[in-house]
């Protein structure tokens, strides 16, 4: 697959995912706003589900089966019509596309440029995130473990209260005024300033409760997912809003957890305010960390923790499971839904050949998706090549027709999203049909209806010079059959040889009267044709001859 085509497909996927996360994060925003009387832990779970869904969208889109939307397809067709209403006498074909030319080079360059701009933004935001994580790792590596007995006892007691089974490391940073923070997933770390040894017992308990509440809920993992989503969708304002709201709700939820441990709200607010005054907040490089007292949202946190009517209940496991299942049921339809720009497959190309392996120009190739009722057509060029660009991914039936050739049909052609495929076509020369009526006077004897159907007539033309019957010997009605009132149709199959004479005469319906059969074979064997020419060379071609013996009363 060429670079331009890959960029178009990647851009289509990116645009489709952006449209979907608009709906997904919009739902999360609405639900979180409607749940303002619920606990902060619930709102945090809602935002976490929306962010995880936005991250999973690109991957699941490539893995899950397609659910094409007829509504979106019809809307796209309506927009493509530029508002031109059909007249009263006009007729329309459902979802037909004519691929007369390749995609515009300017459009391909625009797609490549758009992807380049996205990649630059993704790189900038990702480097900022990686730099922050590297800074955290460097600080942790240069910090000393805090192993004092009273600190360790407090950590163990609070960890037991929050049911934390993972080992938690408490480190003492050399930076004296640094703000307490936590980070890490499997081996979480709490980093405290050097002045922490001098803190009173109440402040120690408040800080430990707050940081361990982050660890118990896995806030740092969800925050990293939010940062990754913000890097991938850096151009989308909802991604930035979701990351900011997730961090805010995690702080509110941790404040609720601290108050549920028995800490007085006013004492907790005073300690946070004192920490914000005396300690230095995290710099931009420390953005991945979860700090206890960020200046930006302290006022709202104080208002929340001092409000006795705020719901501070922890989420039950059943409520968490139900929320996750609801989010999953909402996500899967979004993933399976294919927007018009997203359903594009790669190019489908091929070459049409005749039996002599010469290319066939102006052959009509038809792709039909019976599930979505989409019909796409194109014609082969002077070299016999054809291509389809912009077909929706799915299963198609392919037909190739050309006057003078038999219809080519491939019932199952699978076009996959963002993949290029090809298939060559070899057309067979169409068979010839002749029909002769032999009429005589007499009374017809009733005979059972023949089950054999009439072969289809195929018109010859194009690059084929059709055979021409030069010498036609009329069959004679056998006297014995006429006297007995026997009539019927003799169907003969023959091969018109390169010399123009019928070869391999064979009776197709074996239950016909032998006298009628003999008369038909005897006459047809004397016929002479002008040979069939394919690209100027004589070829053999099948023919079907029907000899009708009829009696007139």
Image (spheres, grey):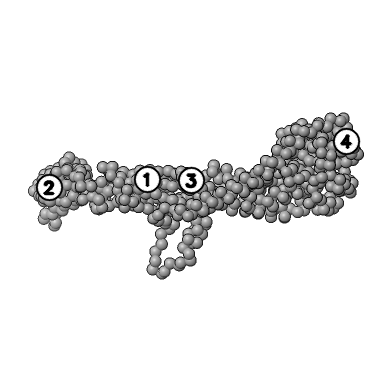
Disc 1 secondary structure class = strand
The residues tagged by marks 3 and 1 sit, at their Cα atoms, a distance apart of: 20 Å
Residue 138 at x, y = what percent?
Answer: 73, 35
Residue at x-position 86% and y-position 45%: 278
Quadrant in which residue 498 is drawn = top left
Marks 3 and 1: which is nearer the front?
Answer: 3
- Is residue 500 visible from the viewing direction of this image? yes
Question: Along the line of sight, which residue is nearer the eye, 238 or 381?
Answer: 381
Give the class, few, some or many, for how many residues have Cα within 10 Å of label 1's Cα (few <14, many ≥20).
some
Q: What residue is shown with label 2?
A: 527
Q: What residue is shown with label 1?
A: 350
Residue 300 at x, y = what percent?
Answer: 81, 53
The residues tagged by marks 4 and 2 sit, at their Cα atoms, a distance apart of: 114 Å
Of the numbered discs 3 and 1, the one sitting upstream in the chain is 3
Disc 4 secondary structure class = helix
Of the numbered discs 4 and 2, the one sitting upstream in the chain is 4
From the viewer's perspective, tell me whether residue 5 is left or right of residue 509: right
Of the numbered discs 1 and 2, the one sitting upstream in the chain is 1
């Amino acid at each position: 697959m060429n670079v331009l085509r890959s960029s178009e497909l990647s851009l289509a996927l990116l645009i489709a995912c952006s449209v979907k996360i608009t709906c997904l994060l919009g739902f999360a925003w609405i639900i979180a706003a409607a749940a303002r009387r619920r606990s902060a832990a619930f709102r945090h779970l809602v935002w976490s589900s929306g962010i995880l869904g936005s991250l999973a969208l690109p991957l699941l889109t490539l893995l899950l089966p397609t659910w094409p939307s007829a509504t979106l397809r019809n809307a796209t067709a309506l927009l493509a019509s530029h508002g031109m209403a059909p007249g009263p006498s006009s007729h329309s074909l459902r979802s037909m596309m004519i691929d007369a030319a390749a995609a515009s080079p300017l459009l391909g360059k625009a797609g490549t440029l758009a992807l380049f701009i996205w990649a630059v933004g993704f790189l900038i935001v990702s480097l900022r995130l990686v730099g922050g994580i590297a800074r955290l790792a460097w600080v942790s590596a240069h910090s000393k473990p805090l192993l004092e007995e009273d600190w360790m006892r407090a950590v163990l007691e609070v960890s037991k209260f929050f049911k934390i089974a993972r080992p938690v490391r408490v480190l003492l940073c050399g930076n004296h005024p640094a703000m307490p923070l936590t980070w890490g997933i499997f081996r979480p770390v709490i980093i405290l300033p050097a002045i922490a040894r001098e803190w009173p017992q109440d402040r120690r308990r408040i800080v430990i409760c707050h940081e361990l509440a982050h660890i118990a809920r896995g806030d740092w993992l969800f925050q990293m997912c939010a940062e990754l989503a913000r890097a991938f969708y850096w151009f989308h304002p909802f991604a930035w809003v979701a990351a900011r709201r997730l961090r805010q709700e995690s702080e509110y939820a941790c404040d609720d957890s601290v108050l549920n441990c028995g800490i007085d709200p006013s004492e907790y607010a005073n300690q946070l305010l004192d920490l914000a005054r005396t300690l230095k907040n995290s710099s931009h490089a420390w953005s991945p960390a979860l700090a206890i007292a960020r200046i930006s949202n302290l006022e709202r946190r104080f208002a929340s923790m001092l409000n006795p009517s705020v719901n501070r209940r922890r989420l039950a496991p059943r409520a968490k499971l139900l929320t996750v299942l609801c989010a999953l049921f909402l996500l899967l339809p979004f993933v399976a839904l294919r927007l018009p720009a997203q359903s594009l497959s790669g190019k489908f190309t091929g070459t049409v050949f005749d039996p002599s392996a010469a290319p066939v120009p102006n052959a009509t190739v038809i792709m039909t998706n019976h599930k979505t009722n989409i019909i796409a057509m194109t014609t082969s060029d002077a070299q016999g090549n054809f291509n389809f660009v912009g077909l929706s991914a799915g299963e198609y039936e392919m037909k190739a027709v050309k006057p003078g050739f038999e219809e080519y049909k491939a019932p199952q052609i699978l076009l996959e999203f963002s993949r290029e495929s090809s298939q060559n076509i070899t057309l067979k020369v169409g068979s010839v049909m002749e029909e002769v009526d032999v009429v005589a006077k007499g009374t017809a004897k009733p005979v059972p209806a023949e089950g054999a159907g009439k072969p289809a007539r195929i018109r010859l033309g194009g690059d084929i010079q059709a055979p021409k019957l030069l010498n036609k010997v009329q069959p004679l009605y056998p006297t014995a059959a006429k006297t007995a009132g026997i009539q019927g149709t003799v169907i003969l199959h023959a091969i018109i040889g390169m010399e123009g004479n019928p070869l391999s005469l064979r009776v197709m319906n074996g239950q016909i009267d032998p006298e009628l059969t003999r008369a038909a074979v005897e006459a047809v064997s004397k016929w002479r044709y002008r040979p069939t020419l394919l690209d100027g060379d004589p070829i053999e071609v099948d023919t079907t001859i029907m000899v009708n013996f009829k009696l007139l009363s």
